[in-house]
Amino acid sequence: MSRHPEISFPPPRRRSLGLIGFGAFGQLMARHLRPHLDLTAYDPALPPGASAEHPDVRLGGLAAAAGCPIVVLAMPVSRIAETVAAIRPHLQPGALVLDVGSVKTLPAAIMAEGLPGDVDIVATHPLFGPQSARHGIAGLKIAVCPVRGRRGGEVTAFLSDVLGLTVIETTPEAHDRELAVAQGLTHLIAKVLVRMEPLPSAMTTRSFDLIMQAVDMVRHDAPEVFQAIEQSNPYAAALRRRFSDLVAELDAELGAPAGPSPGDATRGSPALTATGPSRHHWLNKAEAAADGTA
């Protein structure tokens, strides 16, 4: 038996990460990052101190969060520029800065221009939100766009091997081109359908139910998300025009209805001619348009 005292080594020190912005998505990130990193979060709407809902996250000032070796910007795209200017004096040399915005060309350019040259930059876009990630994030997709430095591979490895995400490495421009379709159209159609509510809920097809499931996944997103997707993506406006043109083209191909007008079709049917709460809002609009009173 050895007479030498046992030597104990302290556990390796965990890396720290600063979250700038602690809204719904920042809190989602914290739930999945805190087992692996020490987290400090800053949000101007929250007082510094302990977080009751997230006891492992320290709410601190801007300097404390921005002074971490890894910094994640988790605020609306419209606030990226002012945030980059605010954190610049507090960043460590060689820090890694990431964003999680819904568009990538604009934030990548702002970070590249506004952050110190010795800071590594990786633009990311988690292709999910609190609603779609409510059962976990393993297998969900995230776009990764290395902007400056050589740590894109490190970020990809952590996201893939540790968090179990499906990583798609791309460029900011390629991301915005594809997401103008995949995300821009989804949110645009969802906004239209929400404005048509109340919609049928009993006599529906499976395809309609799936569409409404997609609507429900984005209906509670913050208005800033929709604005970023439609206004900050440089390819979104042209896509919206193309979509509108094709809808108008199909409408012209269909021409005037050969049968009774929408108003005629409902006459004599108590269920459809009733007034009050049972009256379908979308049907009222359709009839008004057919009568030329919309």
Image: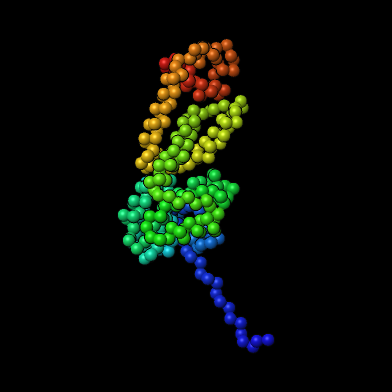
Res. 125 visible in picture? yes
Q: Which residue is drawn at 46% across and 40% down?
A: 183
- Which quadrant, please, contains the C terminus? top left
Name the image quarter holding residue 10.
Answer: bottom right
Q: Which residue lies furthest to the left in this view?
A: 113
The quadrant in which the N terminus is found is bottom right
Q: Quadrant of residue 55?
A: bottom right
Q: Which of 172 and 221 is in front in this view?
A: 172
Location of residue 213 with respect to 38 vertically, above or below: above
Residue 131 at x, y percent in the picture = 54, 44
Does residue 266 sit above or below 212 in this rendering? above
Q: Position of residue 180 (x, y in %)?
A: 42, 39
Q: Could you tell me which residue is drawn at 40 percent across and 49 percent down?
A: 171
Residue found 37% across the figure and 57% down from its top = 148
The image shows residue 138, relative to residue 215, as above or below, that is below
State the colouring used for the structure image.
rainbow
Relative horizontal placement of residue 263, taking residue 103 as reference (left or right): right
Residue at 58% x, 81% y is: 7
- The picture places residue 74, in percent across and down from the top left corner, at 44, 52
Can residue 124 be seen in the rendering of this structure? no
Q: Which residue lies furthest to the bottom in this view?
A: 3
Q: Position of residue 34 (x, y in %)?
A: 53, 59
In the picture as drawn, the residue positioned furthest to the right comes out as 1
